[in-house]
Amino acid sequence: MSKVLIENQDYVIRYVPFPNCGVDGAVISHPDLPCIYINSRVCPKRQREALLHELDHLKNEDLYSDVSAAEIERRMQ
C-alpha cells in the first residue's frame, strides 16, 4: 500500500515498498503530474537521500531528456 506524502501543483511523492531490487527511489512521468516513488523499506536517512536525488531529476528536467537513464545517473554522481 502506498502512502502519499506530498501532492502539490508540480509533483506527487509516494512511499511504497519496493521489491528487493536495490533501488531507493524513482521518478516517473504521468500525464497529469510527475510522481516520485520512495522505497518505504529503506531507513529514513536513505529515504531522505532518495527524495533529494529524485527532486534533482525534476529540477534538471531529466524526464524530458534524450540522454539515457544510465548517463543521467552517471552525471548526478
Image: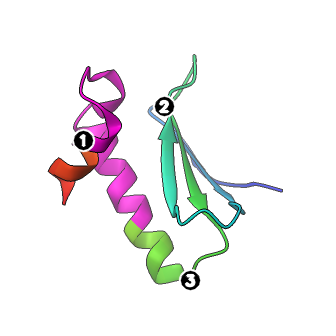
* Above or below for 55 versus 32: below
Q: How many marks?
A: 3
Determine contact: label 2, label 1, CB under 8 Å. no
Q: Is residue 62 magenta?
A: yes
- Label whose residue precedes the other's in the sequence (2 or 1): 2
The three-letter code of the residue at mark 3 reads: Cys
Majority secondary structure of the magenta segment? helix
Comparing marks 2 and 3, which lies closer to the viewer? 3
**Would you name the residue on which mark 2 appears?**
9
- What segment carries the magenta color? 50-71
Residue at image coords 61%, 64%: 39
**Would you name the residue on which mark 1 appears?**
72
Q: Is residue 48 magenta?
A: no
Q: In the picture, which quadrant includes the C terminus? A: bottom left
**Would you name the residue on which mark 3 appears?**
43
Question: Rounded to the nearest whole Å, what is the CA distance between mark 2 and mark 1?
Answer: 25 Å
Residue at image coords 67%, 67%: 20
Q: In the picture, which quadrant includes the N terminus? A: bottom right
18 lies left or right of 25: right
Q: Position of residue 36 (x, y in %)?
A: 52, 46
Comparing marks 1 and 3, which lies closer to the viewer? 1
